[in-house]
Image (cartoon, grey):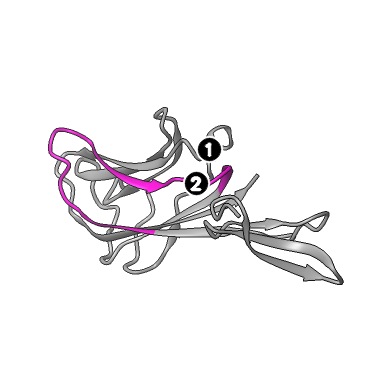
Amino acid sequence: SDHLERYYLRLRRNDEEVLTIDVAGIVRPGCDYTPPDMYHYVVCNVGTIVSADSAAKKSALFKPSAGTATIKKIYMAMDAAHASDSDTNYMQVLIKNNSGNILASRYCDGPQTEDAWVAGVFQSMGDINAAYADVTSSEQLQVEYLETGTATAIARLTFVVVYTYI
C-alpha cells in the first residue's frame, strides 16, 4: 500500500471506526463520530528578538501539514518581564498570514496603555481576526516584529498556536 496515503492507525469502538491517525500524525474523526473538543497545539520557540533596526524582522510560526486549519488562539511568553513603561520605545508583535493580513497583535515594553508581560507566563495575543483564521496547507503564519524607537530585546520568545482542522 502507499504509505503516504494510508491511515497509520485506526481506533474502533464496537467495530465502528471512531478516530484515524495518518502518517503525518493528523487525528481525524472516523465515520459519524466527531470528538467535541479536538484541538491541536504547536509550540514554536523563536529565540531572542533584538532591535529590529530599520526593517521588520520575521519568524515562521505555523504551516498546516494537511487540509485547512482554523486558528483558535495564540499565546506568547518570554523569559523576562517587560513593563509597558514607554510611549516611544517598544516593539509590536504581529501574527500575519501569507497575504499580510493580521490575525493577532500585541505590544512589548509599551505603549503605556498596554498590559505588561510576566516572565515565563503564556499570555493570550487577544482575539483572532475571524476573517483570516483559516489557514490552508499552502499557506503559513509568520510573526513580524515592528520597532518604535529603540525597543528592549525580547528574550527567548515562545508561541503556542491552538487550532482545529476543518
The x, y position of residue 49, in whole percent, is: 21, 52
The residue indicated by pointer 2 is 64
The residue indicated by pointer 1 is 136
Q: Residue at x 18, y 33 (%)?
A: 55
Q: Is residue 121 above or below residue 26?
A: below
Report the span colored magenta: 44-71
* Residues under numbered marks 1 and 2 in contact, where contact means CB atoms less than 8 Å apart: yes
The x, y position of residue 41, in whole percent, is: 51, 59
The x, y position of residue 100, in whole percent, is: 39, 29
Out of 126 and 34, give the one closest to the viewer: 34
Q: CA distance from mark 1 to mark 2?
A: 7 Å
Out of 139 and 109, give the one closest to the viewer: 139
Q: Is residue 148 above or below residue 159?
A: above
The x, y position of residue 56, in whole percent, is: 22, 36
Residue 37 sits inside the magenta stretch = no
Residue 50 sits inside the magenta stretch = yes
Relative placement, left or right, of 95 versus 137 is left
* Quadrant of the image containing the N terminus: bottom right
* Quadrant of the image containing the C terminus: top right
Q: Residue at x 23, y 47 (%)?
A: 86
Q: Secondary structure at mark 1?
A: strand
- Image quadrant where residue 58 sits: top left
